[in-house]
Image: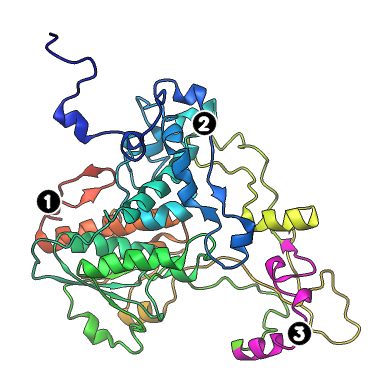
């Protein structure tokens, strides 16, 4: 009798199995040559007859399970996995082993997947469907009841106020709560979620997905105070009763268009009343029945393939038609975007005016210039030359003691995944300042930090 079986593994090896061996079972899958044998398959859209009944997510994440094992087998287990490098996942997730992602029920749905752009397989074949597999993991977790509250075993004496419940604020709150600090999140809107709830359309990120994650956080001991606008109905004196304050208010100061007619607008209530008496086919977006849709873009059209200066493993800057423009292209036969155009003037509807582009409704999507400054001015927090919150180099400390900043309000507009990385690292610094050391994880590794 042989002393060891052919395929025997140690108990330690069993603890770190590939997700394709855990989530699904069935026919033999050739892991060693998977990237050669199997083709990339992305998530399918939900059936059109179902999508037209709601404004929910357009992808069928449950369908991924049918091909999960095959798609995961396409991972080559690279010696140097660039997908988890600085050019790949900003959170440093150990993607080849499909480790837990701190906000996987939110992030994988809205992340542009820089990990896939950095996938080594992309050099010769389409990348591994990392994003889809992450979606499948979390959906399996909720379906099986594995996602349960995990509150800290004990609490510290320290209290932390987090202003803003967007991705950076939520990530910081989750990390600080994990090590036992008492966390209160202030949100000025009716519901928590920030950019995730109020800045991302439901077709990309369902409100139910946000709610289930927030419910877990509440059950873990994080306190959410909504309809609480710090500096207005929440006095600043109340803030300073906390041991540390994290500002994660995002970048919400809109960029203006300094041309004539920019102020031609009406109040929201006037707009709603006026719209009810108009023929909806002549206006609004294509999904509401618009007669035509035109998008003006100041910059030139990006190339169809990765440009020469945009080398792998960087996130590809090639032209990409997303679902919104794809819908219009399918209906009208052409991309609605017109490039290298800068509007010079908006004209009112007086007689005799000639318009280059007729529009019943003009939507300005010009981006944002930084955080709103009312609160920052009241706290006497300094801004940098880009109108973002200025922090001490190499840290998240602002010009005011005990006040920290993270996310878009500090680094400018960026990806949700970058905001989460900011929130996590700010939490690690806050924890270190309060406890003189921190065992909170850095990007992809366990990092011990001494006193700052």
Q: Which residue is mark 3?
A: 278
Q: In this rendering, which labeled residue sits more in front, label 2 or label 1?
A: 2
Q: In this rendering, which labeled residue sits more in front, label 3 or label 2?
A: 3
Q: Which residue is mark 2?
A: 122
Relative image position of residue 156 (x, y in whole percent) = 9, 67
Asked if residue 292 lies in the magenta stretch, the reply is yes
Asked if residue 132 lies in the magenta stretch, the reply is no
Relative image position of residue 306 (x, y in whole percent) = 60, 37
The quarter in which the N terminus is drawn is top left
Q: Which residue is mark 1?
A: 450
Measured Cα–Cα span from mark 2 to mark 1: 40 Å
Compared with 344, 392 (above or below) is above
Callout 1 secondary element: loop
Q: Quadrant of residue 272?
A: bottom right
The residue carrying pointer 3 sits among few (fewer than 14), some (14 to 19) or many (20 or more) residues within 10 Å by Cα, namely few
Q: Can residue 404 be seen?
A: no
Residue at the limit of the structure toward the top, as seen here = 1
Q: In the shown orientation, is residue 404 left or right of residue 434? A: right
Measured Cα–Cα span from mark 3 to mark 2: 50 Å
Q: Quadrant of residue 416?
A: bottom left
Compared with 114, 427 (above or below) is below
Q: Are marks 1 and 3 in contact (CB under 8 Å)?
A: no
- Magenta span covers which residues? 269-295
Callout 3 secondary element: loop
Compared with 175, 2 (above or below) is above
């Amino acid at each position: 009798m042989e002393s060891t079986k052919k395929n025997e593994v140690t108990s330690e090896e069993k603890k770190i199995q590939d997700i394709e061996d855990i989530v699904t079972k069935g026919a033999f899958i050739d892991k060693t040559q998977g990237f050669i044998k199997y083709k990339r398959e992305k998530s399918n859209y939900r059936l059109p007859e179902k999508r037209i009944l709601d404004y929910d997510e357009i992808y069928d994440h449950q369908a991924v399970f049918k091909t999960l094992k095959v798609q995961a087998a396409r991972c080559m287990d690279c010696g140097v996995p660039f997908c988890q490098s600085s050019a790949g996942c900003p959170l440093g997730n150990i993607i080849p082993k499909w480790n837990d992602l701190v906000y996987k029920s939110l992030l994988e749905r809205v992340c542009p997947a820089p990990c896939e752009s950095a996938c080594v397989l992309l050099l010769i074949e389409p990348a591994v469907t990392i994003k889809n597999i992450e979606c499948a993991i979390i959906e399996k977790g909720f379906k099986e009841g594995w996602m349960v509250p995990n509150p800290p075993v004990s609490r510290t004496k320290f209290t932390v106020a987090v202003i803003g419940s967007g991705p950076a604020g939520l990530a910081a709150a989750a990390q600080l709560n994990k090590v036992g600090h008492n966390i209160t999140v202030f949100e000025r809107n009716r519901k928590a979620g920030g950019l995730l709830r109020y800045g991302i359309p439901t077709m990309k990120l369902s409100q139910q997905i946000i709610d289930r994650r927030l419910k877990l956080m509440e059950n873990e001991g994080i306190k959410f105070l909504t309809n609480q606008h710090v500096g207005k109905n929440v006095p600043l004196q109340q803030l300073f009763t906390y041991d540390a304050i994290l500002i994660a208010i995002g970048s919400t100061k809109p960029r203006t268009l300094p041309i004539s007619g920019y102020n031609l607008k009406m109040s929201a209530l006037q707009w709603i009343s006026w719209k009810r008496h108009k023929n909806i086919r002549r206006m609004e977006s294509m999904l509401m029945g618009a007669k035509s849709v035109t998008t003006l873009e100041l910059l030139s059209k990006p190339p169809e393939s990765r440009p020469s200066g945009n080398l792998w493993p960087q996130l590809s800057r090639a032209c990409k038609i997303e679902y919104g423009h794809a819908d219009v292209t399918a209906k009208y036969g052409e991309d609605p975007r017109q490039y290298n155009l800068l509007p010079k003037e908006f004209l009112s509807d007086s007689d005799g005016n000639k318009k280059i582009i007729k529009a019943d409704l003009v939507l300005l999507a010009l981006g944002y210039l930084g955080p709103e400054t009312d609160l920052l001015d009241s706290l006497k927090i300094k801004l940098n030359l880009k109108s973002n919150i200025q922090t001490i180099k190499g840290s998240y400390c602002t010009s005011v003691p005990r006040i920290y900043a993270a996310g878009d309000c500090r680094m400018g507009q960026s990806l949700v995944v970058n905001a989460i990385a900011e929130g996590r690292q700010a939490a690690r610094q806050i924890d270190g300042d309060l406890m003189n050391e921190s065992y909170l994880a850095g990007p992809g590794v366990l990092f011990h930090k001494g006193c700052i």
